[in-house]
Amino acid sequence: MIAKCASAFRSNGYEGTSVDDLVEASGLHRGSLYKAFGSKRGLFVQALGQIADSESDDDDSTDLLLVALMELAPRDAEISAIVSRILSYAQPRHTATSLGARLLNRADLKIPNHTPAKDKP
Amino acid sequence: MIAKCASAFRSNGYEGTSVDDLVEASGLHRGSLYKAFGSKRGLFVQALGQIADSESDDDDSTDLLLVALMELAPRDAEISAIVSRILSYAQPRHTATSLGARLLNRADLKIPNHTPAKDKP
DNA sequence: CCGATTAGTGAACGATCAGTCAAGAATGAT
DNA sequence: ATCATTCTTGACTGATCGTTCACTAATCGG
């Protein structure tokens, strides 16, 4: 259930995901969602915390981490702390380089290649 | 004027920035803003395009680029194209590594350091 | 069975969103 | 000075936002 919501956050971003989106994604009803998580932010914290706890490091986890880093971490100490926790357990994957690479892949922009490549072999 | 708005986008993200924020940041009035740029998105495109045209590569430019990459590029072809343009002229700065590093710096999270450091010298 | 307690439900709330537009102010041509 | 044109302004709109809560359904101890 959290996974479904996390997927919505991953593809729409945090601010770009409405509670209606989360209701639809999770199948839960509005009230139940608020009973379980308290708020939209609470649900995000839960999703991010789950990644930290499971120490997962797949692309989906990285994408949610990117959303947290860009939209929440700069002004939310709790989320910033969870992000730090994730960064510290998965160093090889979550270096600046791999985060940046995933950022570009996510937008369908492979690492830029200056040589125009051979068009007519 | 565009610079002031770009600053708002940088610190709040795209979805996190309301038109009221832009009105306040720019000093322009709502109507004038819409006459000049057509829409919130139009203003963002203008700001991003200005970076591409001037080939600037400072931290502020990188931050707006990050916002574009995370929130707009995956689902907006025009913005994705401008992003590509920026990436291709400033290769040394806008590699995956430097984007990732800026992403972490922006959130006040320096690149994680596994060695706990010497606390008692 | 019954009453109490918890869970599920979605209509409704005030706030805020992006975007519009009619009316006033400024400008320029004659 | 007069009128036509362009710019400026912010009140307004319908939609959508995150959140609440009165209500009903289900669960369970006695």
Image (tube, coloured by chain):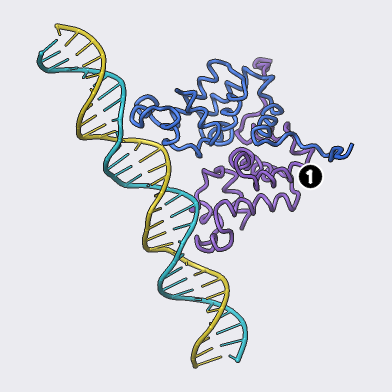
Chain colours: A blue, B purple, C cyan, D yellow
x then y, percent, for residue B101: 69, 32
Q: Amino acid at mark 1?
A: Tyr
**In this figure, which residue is indicated by the disc labeled 1?**
B89
* Residue A84 falls left or right of residue A1: right
* Residue A23 falls left or right of residue B16: left
For the question of whether residue B53 can be seen, the reply is yes
Up-down relation of residue C30 to residue B111 (above or below):
below
x then y, percent, for residue B16: 51, 43
Label 1: how many Cα within 10 Å (few below 14, some 14–19, many 20+): some
Up-down relation of residue B97 to residue B89 (above or below):
above
Up-down relation of residue C27 to residue A63 (above or below):
below
Residue for point 70% across, 30% down: A101
x then y, percent, for residue D10: 42, 63
- Quadrant where the N terminus of chain B sits is bottom right
Q: Toward the viewer: B1 or A111? A: A111
x then y, percent, for residue A53: 53, 16
Residue for point 67% across, 35% down: A108
- Chain letter of disc 1 in the image: B
